[in-house]
Each structure stands twice: as C-alpha cells, then as structure tokens.
C-alpha cells in the first residue's frame, strides 16, 4: 500500500464504520440506539485519528469523552469498549502492506489518552466527592452546636485536614477594641490585628474576596497586615473575610511552611465554607444574645417576685386595710385587714370598678369619697393630684379612709391607694367623753 495511514483512514472510513459494531460487543449504554445513531455518536473518536497534531488528537478525544459522560451519562468502561472496538475494526481492515507502524502508534496513543483522561476524571470526581464529604462534616459541625468556641475549633480542624494546612486560625471582630482577635487557633500564635489595617472592601462585606500567597518569602505582599498576620517560617498563606448578611464578622486564615501548598481545589473548598462559618457565627451570636436577655429577664422576674412577696408580706401584716385601684379604677389589690374592715371577701372586689368598693359603705361620706376617687382618676397629667381624707360608716363601724395617688418617680400616674382604718373605738371614746362632760356640766 502506497497510502499513509491518515489517507488510508479517509478512504476506508465507510468500511471502518461498518465493521466497528461487528468488532465488539455493544456496550449497554448504546444498546437502545440504532446502528446509524451509534456510529454517529462514536465518529469523533475516528476523527481524532486524522487530526494534524498530537495535541489536536488529544483535544478531540477529551471532548468526545466529556460529552458522552456529561450529556449522555455513558460510564467510562463503555467508552473504553468503544475505543477497543475501533482498534479491532481498523486492524481487521488494515492491509498487510499498510502503514502498521503509524497505525499502532496512533491507536496506542488513542487508548492511552482516553485512559489517562478517564483516570483524571475519576481522580477529579474522587476529589470532588471528598470535598463534598468535608463540606458535609463541616456543615454538621456548624449546625450541631451553638457553643461558639467548640464549633469554631472543630470546624477549623476539619478545614485544615481537608487542605493539609499546618496552621489555621479564625479571627473575630472585637468592636470595642477595634480589632480582630484569634477566637480559635491551631499552631497559630499571632496577636490581634487592628481593623484599620484590613482591606476596606472586606470590612464593607465583600464576601468573594480571597488572598492566596504561594510564597511569602518570594512574593512579599505590600499589605502591612499580611506581614502582621504571618510568621517568619510561613511560606503559603490563604486568608478570606467571614461575611454574613453583608456584615464583616472576621477572618479565616490557614498557612503552611511549604511553598505553593494550597492548590486550586483547596481554594475552591476554602471559598465554599466561608459563608457557612460566617452564618454559624451569626447564629451563635444571636443565641448568645437571646440567652443573655433571657437570663437578665429571669433575674428581673425573680427580683420582681421577691419584691412582690415582700410587699405582700408587709400588706398582710399591717393592721390598716389597703385597697389599690389601677389607673382605670379597677380594684387590683385588697389586703386581709381591708377584708376584715369591709366584712367582704377580696374576691368580690378584685377586678371590679371602684364603685363596688364604696358601695359597701353607708351614705355618710360615700359620695365625697366617690367624687374624690373620680377626681384622682380623671385628672390630667399636668394637674396636681391631691390626697383626700374622709370618714365612712360600715356595719355600725366608723372607718377613716385616706385616698392617695400612686406616682412613678417620673410623675406617671399608676392608680390610687386607699388606706382604711377602723376608728370606731376612738369615735366611741370621744362620744363618751363628750357625754360625760355634758352630764357633769
């Protein structure tokens, strides 16, 4: 044969495409296709053998394999079977005096290129799977605890293990001190960094920023804070801002004494976890604030309960009756002494209008007391509320009533307190004294 291998392929293409399916067992991914559809899908592999250069042939093979796997979900083993079938078909048609040397070289290169590419794809998929597993573990750590210190330390350890970093730290903003401080650190002994030296874009919430330095000793970044952050024996550095809902929370930094220690896949993983960590920090801070507020409210409630208990004890122990009406005139407190003086259970007065209180008394002085209560309740904030005293009668007993407004230190009106004192004995004594004096005279 006087033709070279490429020319022979062009002339024999039809025979090769016809022999191709016969030279192999059809892979499962292609069984549902017609013969013409199969060959149409496989044809780029045959085209690669006629490309002008090795680089061009490899590019065609890579593109064909990627299209078959991504668009048609063909497994790598089926692609290898198709390539083997093409090799078998060509060898079966190649004449004895054909360009066997070139044919062998091209076909071997095809098989090797495809195998390497599939190996790279498998390795990349394995790396992606590992990264996804790492992200899952990190997400589990971030959502599994609201203990900020524990959560940050375990997450940092997961990140460092995934990207094989020797050192790492999480810096959080300390607004009071105007700096970022290392909240969690592994093999990292650096001091806090002033906020003023950090990039303004980071502090404004630019979440997609990332600084990656392959060799600190050679590149020597101009930023002052990079030198402050790194140590003399650090060579590789990767640092990025932690941003949640547009708010700058701090920094995530990893370093290693090896130059170019962090690959592109490491940077991709690093970026993927930044927002998760920032959001977890925000959630932990919200939890801390809620817990703190709950504790403060609990302390206030206990204090109020203690004060209420003390006040109740005092009201219970005093001999004078005490009745309290709120700003709307409803009775909200009746002590035991008042129940005794009024000869009525507190349950019949609580929640009732003040008229129910004064309806217990006789007509003497009652109208004046009602008018005084109405005046106290109806006075505007600018008017002066004055105390009122009167004498009332109930069940042949004489009761002295003292009505006073209840005001806060700021002058806010809360209600009226009525102090009742049974003065029956004093009145009877005065009456007896008057009768005695009258009789003597």
Image (cartoon, rainbow, N blue to C red):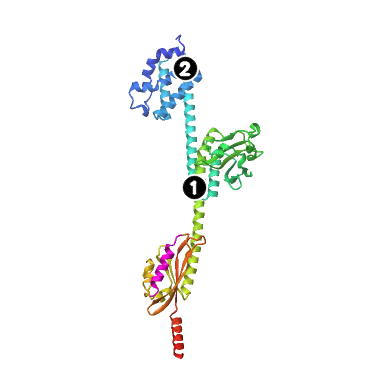
In the rendered structure, the answer to whether residue 34 lies left or right of residue 332 reads left
- Residue 228, compared with residue 306, is above or below; it is above
Q: Residue furthest bottom?
A: 440
Element class at badge 2: loop
User: In what element is the residue under mark 1?
Assistant: helix
Q: Residues within 10 Å of mark 2 (few under 14, many from 20)?
A: some
Residue drawn at x 45%, y 85% as measured from the top left: 434
The answer to whether residue 386 is above or below residue 88 is: below
Q: Position of residue 289 (x, y in %)?
A: 51, 52
Q: Is residue 200 magenta?
A: no
Apparent side of residue 36 relative to residue 142 in the rendered image (left or right)? left
The residues colored magenta run 364-380
Residue 154: % across, % down: 54, 46
Q: CA distance from mark 2 to mark 1?
A: 58 Å
23, 315: nearer the viewer:
315
The residue beneath circle 1 is 283
Q: Main secondary structure of the magenta part?
A: helix
Q: Position of residue 108 (x, y in %)?
A: 48, 21
Q: Residue at x 47, y 17 (%)?
A: 51
Residue at numbered disc 2:
51
């Amino acid at each position: 044969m006087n033709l070279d291998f490429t020319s022979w392929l062009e002339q024999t293409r039809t025979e090769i495409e016809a022999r191709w399916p016969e030279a192999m067992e059809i892979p499962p991914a292609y069984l549902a296709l017609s013969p013409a559809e199969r060959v149409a899908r496989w044809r780029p592999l045959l085209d690669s053998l006629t490309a002008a250069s090795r680089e061009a042939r490899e590019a065609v093979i890579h593109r064909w394999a990627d299209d078959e796997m991504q668009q048609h979900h063909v497994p790598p083993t089926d692609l290898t079977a198709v390539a083997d079938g093409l090799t078998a078909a060509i060898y079966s048609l190649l004449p004895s005096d054909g360009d066997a040397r070139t044919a062998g070289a091209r076909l071997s290169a095809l098989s090797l290129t495809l195998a390497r590419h599939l190996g790279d794809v498998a390795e990349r998929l394995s790396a992606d799977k590992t990264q996804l597993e790492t992200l899952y573990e990190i997400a589990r750590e971030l959502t599994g605890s609201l203990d900020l210190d524990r959560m940050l330390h375990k997450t940092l350890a997961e990140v460092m293990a995934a990207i094989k970093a020797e050192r790492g730290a999480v810096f959080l903003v300390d607004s009071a001190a105007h700096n970022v401080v290392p909240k969690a650190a592994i093999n990292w002994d650096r001091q806090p960094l002033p906020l003023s030296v950090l990039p303004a874009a980071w502090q404004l919430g630019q979440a997609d920023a990332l600084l990656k330095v392959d060799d600190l000793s050679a590149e020597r970044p101009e930023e002052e804070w990079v030198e402050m952050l790194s140590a003399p024996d650090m060579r590789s550095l990767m640092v990025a801002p932690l941003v949640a809902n547009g708010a700058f929370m701090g920094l995530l930094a990893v370093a290693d004494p090896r130059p170019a220690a962090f690959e592109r896949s490491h940077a991709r993983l690093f970026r993927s976890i930044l927002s998760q960590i920032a959001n977890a920090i925000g959630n932990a801070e919200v939890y801390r604030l809620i817990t703190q507020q709950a504790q403060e409210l609990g302390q206030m409630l206990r204090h109020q309960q203690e004060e209420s208990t003390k006040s109740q004890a005092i009201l219970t122990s005093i001999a004078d009756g005490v009745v309290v009406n709120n700003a709307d005139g409803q009775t909200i407190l009746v002590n035991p002494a008042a129940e005794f003086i009024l000869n009525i259970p507190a349950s019949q007065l609580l929640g009732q209008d003040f008229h129910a209180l004064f309806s217990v008394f006789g007509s003497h002085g009652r109208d004046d007391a009602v008018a005084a209560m109405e005046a106290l309740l109806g006075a505007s904030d600018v008017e002066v509320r004055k105390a009122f005293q009167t004498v009332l009668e109930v069940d042949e007993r004489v009761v002295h009533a003292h009505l006073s407004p209840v005001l806060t230190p700021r002058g806010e009106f809360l209600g009226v307190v009525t102090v009742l004192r049974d003065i029956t004995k004093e009145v009877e004594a005065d009456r007896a004294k008057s009768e005695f004096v009258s009789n003597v005279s």
